[in-house]
Image (spheres, rainbow, N blue to C red):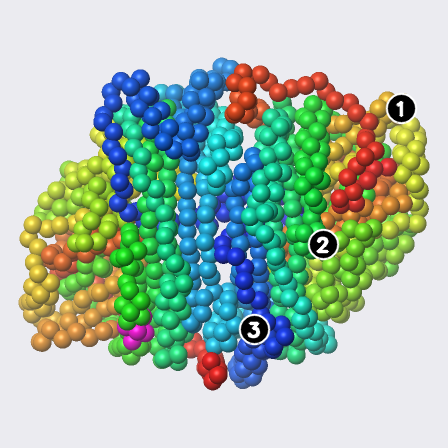
């Protein structure tokens, strides 16, 4: 299901195919797109004020996107395309801030999307926006009548906060041009080379090297007077290798590199070394024993802890979940109560640009509702203090703190940016490991589990379902009490319930590690970061991974030896290596 | 409420990329192919050497055939039968899309992609694994003629297809065991080996003048403030398909299709939404309208929208003669005849001959006995127009055949692929596939004709004559349809033959029964109607006259008019 969830994102990127990017709005003169948006917005605001019911808030957003996508497989290019597109959304709120068309389940009635002309043609831009506004008004006004009826008929809601918060208007026009200068031919060659490096490893059945470079100029104009223009650039290079163990378990290793521009991505030598690393990891995993269900002491690397906190805590701190009556609301009534061990604090800080020299993916100046990003201290010394707020107020939290985020085409909700977990009870890596072994011995277990790297995770926050989370580790080691070398195992998923698991943390490392990724939820895919130190848990529960049953390929890959000999080797037992990549802040205790 | 997942990942699967292919491959149409037919080969050995020779002429075919031979020789699981048949197809799609709205382009994109599809069959021709997941696997293929990368993709897809096939065969046998009667036909029709390397189809054009045509046409919104939407798009596409199978068939064929449309919307004063969307679909660039002609058509469309806005509503009730123009009739024949003569096998346990409405109409009258219908993919040009439904070899490697489907009103044949249906054990070359999909029986060039065709003038006279007989002040003539609803409908007055545009009409009981019983005249004005889509097809149809069709007022509720007027035009522009 996780995989299915990921699809829309990939599709979205995949539409990114086409013609070399060219035009940018000239930043030195008045921006035609912005002035056209503002002119039409003004007209809409004035005209619709006379309608019944009337909107009290209208916003126009445009995302002027230039993107290039290149896919390499087996040393060859499978996709290489560029696109320019201007996506526009009209968001409208009919009624009043106390009760409007977006109330509760009717949230989707607040938005209508289309694409705008690629050139700065004010008449064409004006017409598309007019048409879109008219359609959105038709939808929003009908929805508002339904909301009013439903509210009258249904029992009183627990959280009586208004539907929209009042915030000061902001004007910030960043003239900087988002530039996407990607030499497509040169990158095709580089990707061919990097992807071709996988051909040395016949046991890696399937691999992808994927580059996405995008430059976006985002526009926001609202009936409250906010006008924002800002550029953003992101380049992501993903290397992924896949194989299958003899019992059918699918094994996947992924390395992601992220930078503002493609020029800042690692060199070919580094990338090829990463391919070698993925191949050796997969080979080791393929031959590693399958893990057994286990509950006992565990140590999570910083990256693993970061994903753990993103899923287990972060999503449950998103403001709108405290209001939605179908949500589990684990923390809604725990404000000023202890929810974590008191040595832990958690902030979400979109204004933080980098950590330990690593660029953070969840950085922004203004959120998608035009509210300046704020550093939010969510948990202070174990005590819950704040939520990640969009402009949807909740009991005792009546304002946004700049966490209203979305992907174009969807309504914003409270989302994470850069989630940072800090600790006052931290020790060096070697000491943490010593404490880990001590804990294993204390509990009389033969071994504990060390989670070195994870692929991602997901969580369920809805009330109708168990409050569960899952973190999907890929490099997990058994650390033996008797001092034997660590042993790699495969096929474990961390499972558990939030409140219990968080309070099993007994000690942390002293270095923050960063996980950059893409997070998906109701308001779409947004780039996020999570950072945390390594953590020692008195108990973590793992379950067997739901694995495929297909055998590895029957024949060897083409081109080589025609003898279909099975591709197996002796089980590898290795101690965790010291020389780890620092590409995304990965390090080992 | 469905569960909401909050996921956090940075990996993805290539397989997820299939949705892309679905996006990219919103398909088109066929031009004439210049395949070199090979002489029939009876002996499989001879066929194999001929296929090797054919494959050698193209690096992609050579790589496909090499991997195919390797799979044929080595693919075998313990306790599971080896495949008896394997096929590989690779589709190369090069496409240019552009769209303009209100005088400005908002999309402009050239896309090039390749996909590979593998079918592995376990069992035998009588009963095999072609069922559910056993119908094949598709994946991305390298864009470049890179044998290593292509074979790697084929290797993985073959492995998956074989494993799925072995499971599908077991599942199929289990399903069949629930039904007492056995299947009176084979699962897979044998077909002779065929080698044919067609010319490579490519797009060769300069986009600028075409983009300009879209912008100029949609800029006409300035001439009428009541035009609410005015867009125009084009889609030029070159599709090449490689195919090899273990029977020794090796083919490569290509086609191009060029599509343009205009689309406008307005609202009448009472709120009724009115739309027009004329299009052009051709097999050669030369057959598209010139810039002048395209602009003239755009002007005409805008004028027609205005006329529609001002046109009277249809009367609440009408039952009487309706004349369908050749354009409108082609939609009717496509949907009500074409779709129903496809030999698509129903689900196991269903004893019908096909899935369509004509499942039990074999050897029965389905049209008046003056009308015949053929499907002839081998016809490449009609009335000077390239037929995009043309092909010489279908997507299952079978030579296309001209099929007489309805003779003098009687259904005598179905369009079939390599999946036999009752009484039709062999393919007649109509197995056609949308990109990355399994082939199914489809139309090529569906041609409707009558041995008593009359001129356009006479068919209108006949309409008036029926009105006179039935004492009706007017009959109806429909010019063009959207679905089966009239877009442009005219009253034709009995008194003087005058035509009056009306709006707000829907047909009632326009169905296969009406085609069989109420069709009283056919024109001699056959029109080529190319239908661009996932699988390009052509319908050639004359105008037709029904003596009785019910025309009623639409039930659709009128929309509100815009709350405020459109923006004034910026003076400096």
User: Which residue occupies the foreground of this view, B208 or A578?
Assistant: B208
**Which residue range is magenta in the image?**
B297-303
Q: Main secondary structure of the magenta part?
A: helix
Q: Residue at x 13, y 55 (%)?
A: B519
- Neighbour tally class for label 1: few under 14, some 14-19, many 20 plus, Cα within 10 Å: few
- On the image, the x and y values in percent for residue A318 come to 73, 58
Q: Are marks 2 and 3 on the same chain?
A: yes
Chain ID for label 2?
A
Disc with the residue nearer the chain's start (1 vs 2): 2
- On the image, the x and y values in percent for residue B213 come to 36, 67
Residue linked to disc 3: A33
Disc with the residue nearer the chain's start (1 vs 3): 3
Residue linked to disc 2: A361
- On the image, the x and y values in percent for residue A171 come to 70, 76
Looking at the rendered structure, the secondary structure element under dot 1 is loop
User: Which residue occupies the foreground of this view, B340 or A232?
Assistant: A232
């Amino acid at each position: 299901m996780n995989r299915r969830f990921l699809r829309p994102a990939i599709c979205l990127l995949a539409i990114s195919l086409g013609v070399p990017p060219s035009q940018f709005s000239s930043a030195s003169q008045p921006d035609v797109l912005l002035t056209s948006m503002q002119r039409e917005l003004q007209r809409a605001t004035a005209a619709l004020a006379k309608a019944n019911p009337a909107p009290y808030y209208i916003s126009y957003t445009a995302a002027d996107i230039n993107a290039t996508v290149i896919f390499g497989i087996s040393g060859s290019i499978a996709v290489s395309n560029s696109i320019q597109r201007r996506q526009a959304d009209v968001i409208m709120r009919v009624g009043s801030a106390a009760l409007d068309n977006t109330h509760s389940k009717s949230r989707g009635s607040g938005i209508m999307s289309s694409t705008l002309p690629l050139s700065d043609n004010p008449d064409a831009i004006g017409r598309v926006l007019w048409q879109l506004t008219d359609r959105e008004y038709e939808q929003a006004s009908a929805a508002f009548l339904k909301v009013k009826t439903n509210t009258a008929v249904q029992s009183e809601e627990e959280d009586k906060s208004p539907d929209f918060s009042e915030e000061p208007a902001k004007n910030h026009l960043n003239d900087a041009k988002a530039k996407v200068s990607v030499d497509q031919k040169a990158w095709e060659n580089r990707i061919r080379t990097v992807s071709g490096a996988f051909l040395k490893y016949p046991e890696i059945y399937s691999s992808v090297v994927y580059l996405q470079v995008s430059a976006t100029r985002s526009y926001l104009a609202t009936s409250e007077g906010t006008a924002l223009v800002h550029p953003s650039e992101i380049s992501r290079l993903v290397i992924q290798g896949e194989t299958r163990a003899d019992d059918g378990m699918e094994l996947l290793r992924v390395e992601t590199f992220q930078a503002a521009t493609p020029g800042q991505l690692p060199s070919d030598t580094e990338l090829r070394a990463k391919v070698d690393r993925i191949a050796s990891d997969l080979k080791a995993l393929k031959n590693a024993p399958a893990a057994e269900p286990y509950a006992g002491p565990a140590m999570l690397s910083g990256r693993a802890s970061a994903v753990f906190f993103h899923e287990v805590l972060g999503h449950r701190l998103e403001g709108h979940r405290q209001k939605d009556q179908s949500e589990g609301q684990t923390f809604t009534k725990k404000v000023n109560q202890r929810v974590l061990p008191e040595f832990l604090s958690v902030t979400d800080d979109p204004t933080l640009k980098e950590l330990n020299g690593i660029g953070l993916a969840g950085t922004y100046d203004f959120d998608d509702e035009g509210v300046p990003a704020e550093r939010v201290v969510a948990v202070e010394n174990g005590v819950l203090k704040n939520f990640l707020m969009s402009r949807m107020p909740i009991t005792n939290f009546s304002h946004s703190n700049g966490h209203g985020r979305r992907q174009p085409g969807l309504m914003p909700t409270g989302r994470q940016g850069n989630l940072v977990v800090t600790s006052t009870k931290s020790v060096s890596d070697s000491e943490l490991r010593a404490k880990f072994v001590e804990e294993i011995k204390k509990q009389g277990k033969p071994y504990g589990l060390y989670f070195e790297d994870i692929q991602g995770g997901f969580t369920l926050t809805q009330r109708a379902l168990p409050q569960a989370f899952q973190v999907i580790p890929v490099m997990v080691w058994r650390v033996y009490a008797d001092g034997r070398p660590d042993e790699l195992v495969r096929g474990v998923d961390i499972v558990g319930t939030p409140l219990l698991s968080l309070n099993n943390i007994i000690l942390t490392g002293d270095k923050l590690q960063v996980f950059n990724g893409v997070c998906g939820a109701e308001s779409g895919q947004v780039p996020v970061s999570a950072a945390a130190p390594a953590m020692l848990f008195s108990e973590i529960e793992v379950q067997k991974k739901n694995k495929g049953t297909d055998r590895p390929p029957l024949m060897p890959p083409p081109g080589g030896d025609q003898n279909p000999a099975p591709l197996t080797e002796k089980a590898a037992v290795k101690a965790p290596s010291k020389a780890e990549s620092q590409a995304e802040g990965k390090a080992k205790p | 409420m469905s569960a909401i997942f909050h996921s956090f990942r940075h990996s993805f699967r290539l397989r997820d990329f299939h949705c892309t292919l679905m996006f990219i491959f919103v398909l088109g149409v066929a031009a004439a192919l210049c395949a070199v037919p090979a002489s029939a080969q009876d002996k499989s050995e001879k066929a194999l050497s001929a296929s090797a020779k054919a494959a050698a002429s193209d690096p992609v075919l050579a790589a496909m055939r090499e991997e195919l031979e390797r799979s044929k020789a080595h693919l075998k699981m313990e306790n599971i039968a080896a495949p008896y048949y394997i096929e590989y197809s690779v589709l190369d799609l090069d496409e240019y899309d552009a769209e303009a709205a209100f005088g400005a382009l908002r999309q402009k994109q050239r896309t090039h992609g390749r996909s590979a599809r593998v079918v592995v069959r376990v069992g035998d021709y009588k009963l095999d694994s072609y069922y559910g997941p056993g119908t094949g696997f598709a994946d991305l293929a390298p864009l470049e003629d890179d044998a290593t990368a292509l074979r790697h993709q084929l290797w993985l897809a073959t492995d998956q297809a074989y494993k799925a096939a072995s499971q599908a065969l077991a599942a199929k046998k289990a399903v069949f065991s629930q039904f007492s009667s056995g299947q009176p036909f084979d699962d897979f029709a044998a077909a002779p080996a065929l080698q044919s390397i067609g010319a490579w189809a490519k797009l060769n054009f300069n986009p600028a003048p075409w983009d300009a045509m879209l912008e100029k046409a949609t800029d006409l919104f300035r001439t009428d403030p009541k035009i609410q939407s005015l867009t125009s798009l084009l889609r030029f596409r070159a599709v090449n398909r490689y195919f090899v199978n273990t029977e020794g068939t090796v083919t490569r064929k290509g086609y191009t299709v060029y599509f343009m449309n205009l689309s406008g919307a307005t609202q009448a004063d009472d709120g009724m939404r009115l739309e027009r969307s004329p299009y052009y679909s051709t097999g050669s660039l030369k057959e598209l309208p010139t810039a002048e002609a395209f602009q003239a058509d755009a002007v005409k469309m805008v004028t027609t929208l205005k006329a529609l806005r001002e046109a009277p509503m249809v009367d609440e009730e009408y039952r009487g003669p309706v004349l369908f123009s050749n354009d409108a009739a082609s939609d009717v024949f496509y949907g009500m005849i074409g779709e129903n003569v496809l030999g698509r096998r129903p689900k196991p346990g269903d004893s019908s001959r096909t899935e369509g409405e004509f499942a039990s109409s074999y050897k029965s009258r389905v049209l008046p006995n003056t009308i015949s219908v053929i499907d002839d993919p081998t016809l490449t040009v009609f009335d000077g127009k390239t037929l995009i439904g043309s092909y010489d070899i279908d997507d299952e490697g079978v030579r296309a055949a001209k099929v007489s489907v309805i003779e003098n009103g009687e259904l005598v044949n179905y369009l079939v692929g390599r999946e036999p249906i009752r009484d039709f054990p062999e393919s007649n070359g109509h197995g056609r596939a949308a990109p990355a999909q399994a082939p199914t029986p489809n139309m090529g060039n569906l041609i409707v004709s009558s041995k008593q065709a009359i001129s356009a003038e006479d068919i209108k006279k006949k309409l008036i004559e029926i009105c006179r007989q039935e004492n009706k002040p007017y009959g109806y003539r429909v010019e063009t349809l959207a679905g089966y609803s009239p877009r442009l409908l005219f009253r034709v007055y009995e008194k003087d033959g005058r035509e009056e545009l009306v709006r707000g009409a829907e047909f009632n009981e326009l169905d296969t029964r009406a085609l069989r019983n109420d069709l009283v005249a056919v024109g001699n004005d056959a029109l080529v109607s190319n239908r661009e889509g996932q699988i390009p097809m052509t319908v050639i149809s004359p105008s037709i006259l029904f003596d009785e069709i019910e025309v009623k007022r639409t039930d659709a509720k009128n929309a509100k008019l815009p709350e405020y007027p459109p923006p004034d035009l910026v003076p400096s522009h």
